[in-house]
């Protein structure tokens, strides 16, 4: 029988984190285009291959979140990516939601789709080697108007329903209620919204009898909005982020992983290091680590540019950033 608590804890060991390689086709296309690379099934496979086949990533990664397309793709070794990762001790995971749509009650806000047909998809993902899954909700801040309590509650209900289905399927759910960086809001407003969102989420999980010890929380940091004109110090980010989580997240969960959410690689690394240090000071009850996408990828993508002759250089750049980010959680 699957021990979901042990599986969840295995994703947050000391000094290791997750690579979020679960960009949808649309997002991957946009990401590649920014480096002058056309998007086809083959260039997206090469994009994944650049990172997933890098020698030595097992020193830094406990798991990789994949997109559905990538589950069925092969690396240089002619093995399917999930199998290749598992052979190196890296757990393959999968993005299980189907993206967002406007919230009917307020079209300025978004809700996440994917509950219809989810049990069947989960069984297929499991057959393909996935050991954990992720569901992202989007929480937008606009002054005191947004988010509305209704949108937070609806997204929390869907996250809880997703988590219940995933646990019933014998896999670990990662819950990602992302409070967006976009906007003019203050860091204190971000902290308050994180607290409200997490409080609603974990109350809803309890209502739906989700085993909290077998879930991982993926969260944004408490940051001033990217249009606020304010540049937070890592210590400020750490103070408000850790305080928000201590206030609203139960101690039973398996771990907390942070998304980079629009930060550049150096910012995401420095803020993570400060959060880890602050969490140690206040004796936070959960292991904390990273679940980064762009903050791990963008320097290597710039070095690669879609050219075969640049692969090894790009992989060296990727490993260097992975090392820095892993060091940030090794206190």
Image (cartoon, rainbow, N blue to C red):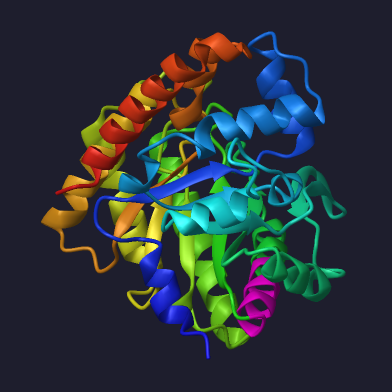
Quadrant in the rendering for residue 96: bottom right
Position in image of residue 216 (x %, y %): 46, 65
Q: Is residue 279 above or below residue 116?
A: above
Q: Pick whichever, 218 or 66, lies toward us.
A: 66
What range is drawn magenta here? Answer: 157-169
Position in image of residue 215 (x %, y %): 49, 72
- Which residue is at 26% across, 45% downward? 275
Position in image of residue 298 (x %, y %): 50, 21
Outermost residue on the front side: it is 77
The answer to whether residue 79 is seen in the rendering is: yes
- Which residue is at 24% across, 57% downward? 14
Q: Is residue 237 rendered to the left or right of residue 222? A: left
Q: How many marks?
A: 0
Q: Pick whichever, 240 or 277, lies toward us.
A: 277
- Which residue is at 36% across, 59% downward? 245
Position in image of residue 35 (x %, y %): 63, 11
> Does the magenta run of residues contain 218?
no
Q: Pick whichever, 161 or 248, lies toward us.
A: 161
Q: Is residue 61 rendered to the left or right of residue 84? A: left
- Which residue is at 41% across, 58% downward? 89
The overriding secondary structure of the stretch rendered in magenta is helix
Quadrant in the rendering for residue 171: bottom right
The answer to whether residue 157 is seen in the rendering is: no
Outermost residue on the bottom side: it is 1
Q: Pick whichever, 216 or 160, lies toward us.
A: 216
């Amino acid at each position: 029988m699957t021990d979901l608590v042990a599986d969840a804890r295995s994703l947050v060991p000391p000094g290791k984190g997750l690579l979020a390689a679960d960009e949808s086709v649309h997002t991957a296309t946009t990401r590649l285009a920014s480096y002058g690379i056309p998007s086809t099934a083959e260039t997206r496979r090469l994009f994944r291959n650049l990172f997933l086949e890098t020698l030595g990533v097992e020193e830094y990664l406990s798991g990789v979140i994949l997109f559905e397309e990538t589950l069925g793709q092969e690396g240089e070794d002619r093995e399917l990516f999930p199998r290749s990762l598992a052979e190196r001790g890296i757990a393959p995971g999968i993005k299980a939601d189907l993206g967002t749509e406007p919230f009917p009650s307020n079209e300025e806000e978004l809700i996440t789709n994917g509950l219809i047909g989810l049990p069947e998809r989960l069984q297929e993902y499991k057959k393909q080697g996935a050991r954990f899954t992720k569901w992202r909700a989007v929480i937008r801040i606009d002054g005191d108007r947004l988010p509305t309590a209704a949108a937070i509650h609806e997204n929390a209900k869907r996250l809880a329903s997703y988590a219940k289905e995933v646990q019933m399927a014998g896999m670990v759910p990662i819950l990602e209620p992302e409070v967006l960086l976009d906007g003019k809001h203050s860091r204190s407003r971000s902290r308050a919204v994180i607290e409200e969102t997490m409080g609603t989420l974990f109350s809803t999980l309890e209502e739906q009898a989700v085993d909290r010890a077998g879930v991982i929380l993926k969260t944004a940091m408490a940051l001033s909005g990217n249009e606020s004109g304010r540049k937070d110090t890592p210590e400020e980010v750490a103070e408000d982020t850790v305080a928000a989580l201590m206030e609203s997240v139960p101690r039973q969960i398996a771990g907390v992983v942070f998304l980079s959410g629009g930060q550049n690689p150096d910012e995401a690394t420095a803020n993570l290091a400060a959060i880890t240090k602050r969490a140690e000071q206040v004796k936070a009850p959960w292991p904390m680590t990273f679940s980064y996408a762009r903050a791990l990828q963008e320097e290597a993508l710039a070095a690669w540019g879609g050219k075969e002759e640049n692969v090894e250089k790009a992989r060296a750049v990727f490993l260097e950033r992975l090392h820095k980010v892993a060091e940030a959680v090794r206190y």
